[in-house]
C-alpha cells in the first residue's frame, strides 16, 4: 500500500505522495485513463527512477533486466551494425546509445517527457546523441517498414491495455523478416506480492486473473496502472499480429549478484524467474 499523500511542494515526497495515491484497486482501466495515469506517473517518477537505477543501467549500456543480462553478451538482436533500430519505451535511452555505439542507426521513443529529459542528459553526458521521439507505443509516428530491428527493455508493454495494439504498430514499422525482442516482468510474478523478501514467496492471487493492478487517488482515479498477461496471452498476441516466437528466455539470477530492484531480489531470483525475454521475428 502506498504512503499517505503529502504536499506536492515537498521535495522529499515519493512519487505516490506527489500524485496523491492513497490506495490500490483491481479494476479494468481503458486506454485513455491508462495513458494519462502512466504519463503522469513516469513524468513524476523520472528523477527518482534515474537516481535509483541509473548507475546499474549505465549511460550507454543495454541491460535487458534486473538480472543484469546485457546485449553486449546476449546478442539477442543479432548484428545491429548499419541497421535502423527502434527502441520502444526507451526511458533514459541507455540501450539506444549502446546500439548507436555498436554501429546502429538507433531511435529512442518514450511516452514520458520526464524520462526523455534524462535521455537528453545522457546524450549530452556521453556525446552519443541518439534521436529521441516522444510517442505512445500504441501510435508510433514512423512510416511502414522503416526499421530493421525493434526492441524494448521493460518499456511500454506492461502499461498498455492491449498487447496486440503495440505489436501491430511494431509490425507495421518493421520490415518483413526482422527481429522484435522485448523483456517484461515474468508473468508468474503476478501471483506473488511485490516484495523482495520472504513475504514475496507466498502466492496471494491467481495467475489467471488479468484484472489490472491500479493505484488510485482519493477520488478513485488511477495514478498508476499495470496489466498482467499470462505466457499464453503473449504467445497468442504475437501469433495474431504476425510474429514468430523464436525463443523465450528466463534469465537465472547470477551467482554473486546482490542488487535488489523493487521486487527482484537474490532470494526470489534463486527460486523462480523474474524476467521473460521474448525473441520474435516479423513474418
Ligand atoms: C521501466 S521503464 C524502462 C525504461 C528503460 N528501458 C530502462 O530499462 O530503464 C518503462 C518506460 O516505459 C515508458 N512507457 C510507459 N508507457 C508507455 C507507452 N504507452 N508508450 C511508450 N512508452 C511508455 C515509461 O515512460 C518508461 O520510460
Image (cartoon, rainbow, N blue to C red):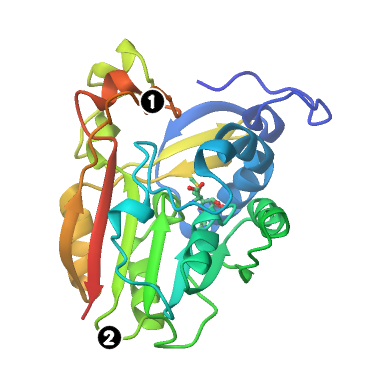
Disc 1 element? loop
In the foreground, 88 or 233? 88
| Coordinates of residue 120 in the picture (x, y in percent) | 70, 59
In the foreground, 86 or 23? 86
Q: Residue at x 61, y 43 (%)?
A: 41
Residue 137 seen anywhere in this rendered image of the structure? no
Q: Residue at x 23, y 66 (%)?
A: 280
Mark sitting earlier along the chain (1/2)? 2
Q: Is residue 244 above or below residue 265?
A: below
Disc 2: which residue: 176
| Coordinates of residue 168 in the picture (x, y in percent) | 34, 74
Q: Which mark is residue 283?
A: none
* Quadrant containing the C terminus in the rendered view: bottom left
Residue 141 appears in which quarter of the rendering?
Answer: bottom right
Q: Is residue 168 above or below residue 47?
A: below
Q: Which mark is residue 194?
A: 1
| Coordinates of residue 211 in the picture (x, y in percent) | 33, 41
Question: Quick one: which residue is furthest to the top in this view?
Answer: 198
Amino acid at each position: 500500500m502506498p504512503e499517505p499523500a503529502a504536499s506536492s511542494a515537498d521535495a522529499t515526497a515519493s512519487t505516490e505522495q506527489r500524485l496523491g495515491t492513497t490506495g490500490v484497486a483491481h479494476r479494468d482501466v481503458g486506454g485513455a485513463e491508462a495513458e494519462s495515469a502512466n504519463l503522469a506517473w513516469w513524468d513524476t517518477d523520472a528523477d527518482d527512477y534515474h537516481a535509483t537505477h541509473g548507475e546499474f543501467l549505465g549511460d550507454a549500456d543495454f541491460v535487458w533486466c534486473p538480472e543484469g543480462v546485457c546485449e553486449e553478451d546476449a546478442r539477442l538482436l543479432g548484428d545491429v551494425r548499419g541497421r535502423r533500430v527502434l527502441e520502444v519505451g526507451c526511458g533514459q535511452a541507455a540501450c539506444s546509445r549502446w546500439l548507436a555505439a555498436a554501429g546502429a542507426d538507433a531511435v529512442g521513443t518514450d511516452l514520458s517527457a520526464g524520462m526523455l529529459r534524462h535521455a537528453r542528459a545522457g546524450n549530452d553526458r556521453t556525446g552519443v546523441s541518439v534521436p529521441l521521439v516522444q510517442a505512445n507505443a500504441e501510435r508510433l509516428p514512423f512510416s511502414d517498414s522503416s526499421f530493421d530491428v525493434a526492441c524494448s527493455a521493460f518499456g511500454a508493454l506492461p502499461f498498455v491495455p492491449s498487447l496486440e495494439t503495440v505489436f501491430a504498430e511494431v509490425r507495421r514499422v518493421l520490415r518483413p523478416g526482422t527481429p522484435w525482442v522485448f523483456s517484461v516482468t515474468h508473468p508468474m510474478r503476478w501471483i506473488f506480492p511485490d516484495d523482495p523478501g520472504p513475504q514475496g514467496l507466498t502466492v496471494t492471487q491467481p495467475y489467471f486473473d488479468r484484472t489490472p493492478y491500479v493505484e488510485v487517488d482519493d477520488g478513485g482515479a488511477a495514478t498508476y496502472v499495470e496489466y498482467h498477461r499470462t505466457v499464453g496471452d503473449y504467445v497468442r498476441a504475437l501469433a495474431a499480429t504476425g510474429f514468430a516466437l523464436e525463443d523465450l528466455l528466463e534469465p537465472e539470477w547470477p551467482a554473486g549478484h546482490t542488487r535488489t530492484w523493487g521486487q527482484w531480489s537474490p532470494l526470489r531470483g534463486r527460486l523462480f524467474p523474474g524476467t521473460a525475454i521474448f525473441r520474435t521475428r516479423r513474418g
